[in-house]
Amino acid sequence: MDSRPCRARRRVAGGIGALVAAVLVIPGLALAPAHAALSSSSTLSTTGVLDPVTELVTPVISGAGTVSGPGLSCINTTSGQATCTDSITLSDIGGSLTSVLLAAAPADGWQFGGWSGACSGMSTTCAVDATALTGALSGTPLAPLATFIPADGSDDPLPGTCEIGIADCTPPVTRLTGKPSVTKTSRAADGEGVTRQTTATFTFQAFEPVEGSDPPVAGPTQTEGATFECKLLEKPATTPDFAACPGGTAGSASYSALTDGTYEFSVRALDAHGNKDATPETFTWTVDTTAPETVLNTRTRFWVLARKATFGLDVDAPDVASDVIFQCYLDGAGRACPTVKFASGTHTFGASAEDRAGNADETPVTHTFTMPVNNKALNHSRGWTKAKVRGTFLKTASITRKKGAKLATRATGITRIALVASKGKGHGVVKVMLGKKTLKKVSLAQKRNVKKKVVPIARFSTPASGKVTIHVISKGKKVVVEGLGIATR
């Protein structure tokens, strides 16, 4: 807000008078280049009155409007300054010198801002007379200049504030005292933050500026009789005009039924003399009522040979992971994110995101996996040795070379079976059975030694139940069993 409209207005008036081209010229009279004059071929008589012959009056217009008079019509359609192409010769209007009457009229959207130069005052009419002409002898700026300003007040103060002697020509300073509650995000486009509320209420006050502050700073004194104008812009859109603040309560504005998007609220104060805050208070925020879509971008394999797993979580655009909170679940119970711990068995991991506005994903993303039981959980027949073996599943294994040695367990609701074993040169062969049915024979022999090898055995379209047995069918060859995977989902 400019706290110096008075001074600015006076500079404009003086500056324009100095910039106007010569409009009142008297032959033989040398004027300073910045001055305007009436052109004439006459001289002063002994009585001191000009003898009208070709004295010229050429108006100048600043802003959009017209100036008319006897024999001339001047129009300016721009916001800049223009010199009239028509001129009046004073001798054209009568046999003796009296005056030229000029009339100013603003264009649509503009208002008259006053005369300067050869004319002065706030009346829309002006008479250029002998007094003005004889003033040219002393070098007085004589340009009859009409000024028009925008009717919406976007230029200098309205007519009738500073120029005619009213003491208060200092615009107030607007301050927001209440605004919607929002949560800050990492996105600059969200403004001050986001909210899922579709209504917004603002409160504001007007204060007198601290004297001498530039830019103006609100002082402790409230502006008496202040009114306010507001506008609400939904980005991106055409900027609306300021208008009366909605809501019906002085010093407040209320909006409802806001849709998702980014909004900019602006408010400016006007004092009782029409001075407007040139730098309205603004507040930008985002309404977001849309829940984020949770994305699981890294996950475990189905068979997990560990007691914990870490999942990679993200959200679909326009949300970003840094602006959401993830809630994780394991088999329906809340767990810390993104790493979860578990025991042997089949588990379902779930995760849902909640954004900064408070919108939560009601359809969590899920992933099902199974951790096998290790060798210690199996029933052993004779011939097996349980040992700690570095690099194996849970660092233990059951080892045998005896044909007919068995490992077994019972399970219900089986959907998949997998064997966890070591393979290597000279290793033997086993068969995996469900009840009395052989599901698969597995050779554990290969040239390169490997541990924690998951060997899929069977999948069931209908969940199965019974005794699962690992039966050694080779003789004298090493068999190393690390665990057995039994999935139930």
Image: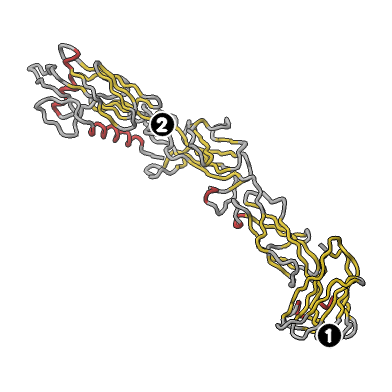
Dividing the picture into quarters, in which one does residue 394 lie? bottom right
Residue position for label 2: 153
Q: Report how many numbered discs are placed on residues in the image.
A: 2
The residue positioned 87% from the left and 78% from the top of the image is 471
Residue 123 visible in the picture? no
From the viewer's side, name the closer residue of 107 and 207: 107
List x then y, in percent, for residue 88.
21, 19
Q: Nearer the viewer, residue 51 or 76?
A: 76
Q: Nearer the viewer, residue 386 or 8?
A: 386
What is the three-letter code of the residue carrying label 1?
Answer: Thr
On residue 400, the disc is 1
Secondary structure, mark 2, is: loop
Tell me which label, 1 or 2, sits earlier in the chain. Answer: 2
Q: Position of residue 489 (x, y in %)?
A: 81, 62
Residue 412 visible (yes or no): yes
Q: Residue furthest left?
A: 46
Image depth: mark 1 or mark 2 in front: 1
Q: Residues within 10 Å of mark 2 (few under 14, many from 20)?
A: some
| Whole-percent x, y for residue 184 in the image | 57, 51
The extreme top residue here reads 95
Residue 345 spot, x, y in % from top left: 81, 67
Q: What residue appears at the point 75 percent right and 77 percent down from the top-left corner?
A: 393
> Vertically, is 81 above or below 367?
above
Q: Nearer the viewer, residue 135 or 109?
A: 109
- The residue that appears at 18% across and 25% down in the rendered structure is 24
Q: Which amino acid does the dot numbered 2 rest on?
A: Gly
Taking 482 as reference, is 294 left or right? left
Q: Specify the farthest residue to the bottom.
A: 476
| Residue 160 badge | none
